[in-house]
Image (tube, rainbow, N blue to C red):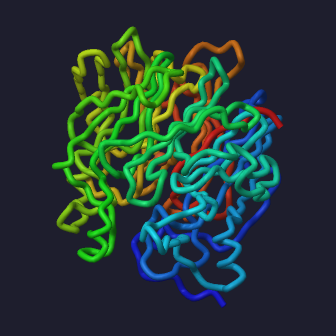
């Protein structure tokens, strides 16, 4: 019998899970869904059915929400990701800790990378749809029914785990990714992966980072792969001190690993970088040896303790959109804040990934300083060429998800498209899919497809074109 969930801030309000799977056809729509929009928006996040012991938002069982859109009509369904861990929890009727195997000879924590929570990102590549979580292998999902298909059908043979933020190169069609702590938990080894559209592993090469740390995202350009490493370090001795191995340790410094595309990982060079913390990058490109990337920079890692074991104050751990320029030959780095508002979940028109982008889209929270308790309540468009910044504010207390860009047609110019996001209405305690014109964000949604229930705050999502 399922026990009540523990009293934890990430298990309350709209962080808390929903305890059902549903399928709804033909949602009620306010406005008009663009007639030629045909495909599926997927959203994923933690939605634990059972919790054992201490809880962290990042470790709840993944649930996917899908909006299938065609001919102006929207169907919806949500399903748990039935990983081996989740199936076992259902069988036992109680939560399990993440798989931990201690090697009796080495004393190290080992994992087969196939017992994760599949809760962070969901991404279509070729005919595959995979749920991703950075401690595990990609977890395959049926794009229409959301039936869990399991590990090993995509990217089989990769060494170590796969980041939740791999990059699909629109020119080659290949997916580039990485893993960290490849050899074992607490190791400074990482892996660089390349996977083709058929899901076959083309390369999975192990290298050493300056230290063992949590690495959430990275960037690629046409000519380079960059692995920025910020000091959310892993030290097993902290478990005895404050029960958790990860902490933000600014004394460890920050580094960017630079690899030319196609070169062996033995050629990675490490550049010293300013200390901060970055979960997510908007995109990157290079002009010769000058690499530009946009990221959400935090002064320290939110949601994780300092080396003293204290969580940072909310006001001290706000992320801001920042542009970096890195001369990979001299190691010179410039950094400039481009938006002075707390924001996260940056996205672009993905057809321009690894090339110079003009437009960026993020979830922002300009009312957070006024005590807004929601996650992010604005969808904001940044035009880097004109300098224009346009926002739609969903209202105090409401929350928007990461805005996903969908081009209006194959011939559309960069930025000619729709932004799809989920909206949580704190008054009605329900969620909806909202569709905005990416060239007129400030006008608000052109359509809202309404649910009778809420979608808990989650992490990421993406679009899959076609039926
Ligand atoms: Fe992420």
* Residue 274, x across and y down, in percent: 21, 35
Depicted 230 relative to depicted 262: above or below: below
Q: Nearer the viewer, residue 16 or 72?
A: 16
* Residue 117, x across and y down, in percent: 59, 63
Q: Quadrant of residue 309?
A: bottom left
- The residue positioned 37% from the left and 20% from the top of the image is 388
* Residue 418, x across and y down, in percent: 61, 29
Outermost front residue: 105
Outermost bottom residue: 1
Q: Quadrant of residue 260?
A: top left
Depicted 416 relative to depicted 297: above or below: above
Q: Nearer the viewer, residue 30 or 93?
A: 93
- The residue positioned 36% from the left and 18% from the top of the image is 291
Q: Quadrant of residue 237?
A: bottom left
* Residue 166, x across and y down, in percent: 55, 38
Depicted 238 relative to depicted 167: above or below: below
Q: Is residue 82 visible?
A: yes
Q: Quadrant of the N terminus?
A: bottom right
Give the number of callouts.
0
């Amino acid at each position: 019998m399922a026990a009540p969930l523990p009293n934890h801030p990430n298990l309350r309000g709209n962080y808390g899970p929903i305890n059902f799977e549903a399928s709804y056809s033909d949602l009620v729509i306010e406005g008009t869904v663009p007639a030629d929009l045909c495909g599926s928006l997927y959203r994923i996040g933690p939605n634990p059915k059972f919790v054992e012991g201490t809880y962290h938002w990042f470790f709840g069982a993944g649930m996917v929400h899908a909006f299938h859109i065609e001919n102006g009509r929207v169907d919806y369904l949500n399903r748990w990701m039935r990983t081996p861990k989740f199936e076992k929890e259902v069988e036992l009727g109680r939560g399990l800790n993440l798989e931990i195997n201690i090697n009796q000879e080495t004393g190290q924590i080992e994992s087969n990378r196939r017992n994760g929570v599949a809760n962070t990102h969901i991404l279509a590549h070729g005919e595959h749809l995979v749920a991703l979580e950075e401690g595990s292998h990609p977890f395959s999902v049926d794009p229409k029914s959301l039936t869990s298909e399991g590990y090993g059908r995509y990217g089989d043979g990769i060494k170590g785990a796969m980041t939740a933020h791999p990059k699909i190169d629109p020119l080659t069609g290949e997916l580039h990714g990485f893993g960290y702590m490849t050899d074992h938990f607490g190791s400074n080894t990482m892996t660089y992966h390349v996977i083709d559209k058929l899901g076959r592993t083309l390369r999975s090469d192990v290298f050493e980072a300056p230290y063992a740390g949590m690495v959430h995202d990275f960037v690629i350009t046409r000519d380079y792969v960059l692995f920025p490493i910020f000091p959310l370090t892993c030290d097993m001795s902290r478990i005895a001190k404050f029960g958790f191995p990860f902490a933000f340790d600014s004394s460890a410094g920050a580094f960017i690993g630079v690899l030319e595309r196609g070169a062996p990982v033995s050629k990675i060079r490490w550049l010293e970088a300013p200390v901060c913390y970055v979960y997510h990058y908007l995109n990157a490109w290079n002009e010769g040896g000058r690499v530009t990337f946009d990221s959400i920079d935090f002064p320290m890692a939110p949601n994780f303790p300092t080396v003293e074991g204290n969580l940072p104050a909310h006001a001290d751990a706000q992320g801001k959109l920042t542009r970096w320029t890195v001369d990979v030959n001299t190691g010179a780095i410039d950094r400039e804040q481009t938006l002075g508002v707390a924001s996260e979940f940056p996205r672009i028109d993905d057809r321009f990934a690894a090339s110079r982008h003009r437009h960026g889209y993020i979830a922002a929270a300009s009312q957070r300083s006024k005590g807004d308790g929601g996650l992010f309540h604005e969808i904001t468009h940044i035009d880097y060429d004109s300098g224009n910044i346009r926002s739609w504010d969903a209202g105090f207390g409401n929350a928007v998800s990461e805005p996903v860009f969908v081009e209006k047609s194959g011939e559309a110019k960069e930025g000619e498209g729709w932004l799809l996001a989920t909206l949580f209405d704190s008054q009605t305690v329900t969620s909806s899919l909202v569709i905005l014109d990416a060239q007129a964000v400030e006008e608000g949604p052109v359509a809202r497809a309404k649910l009778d229930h809420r979608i808990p705050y989650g992490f990421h999502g993406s679009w899959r074109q076609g039926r």
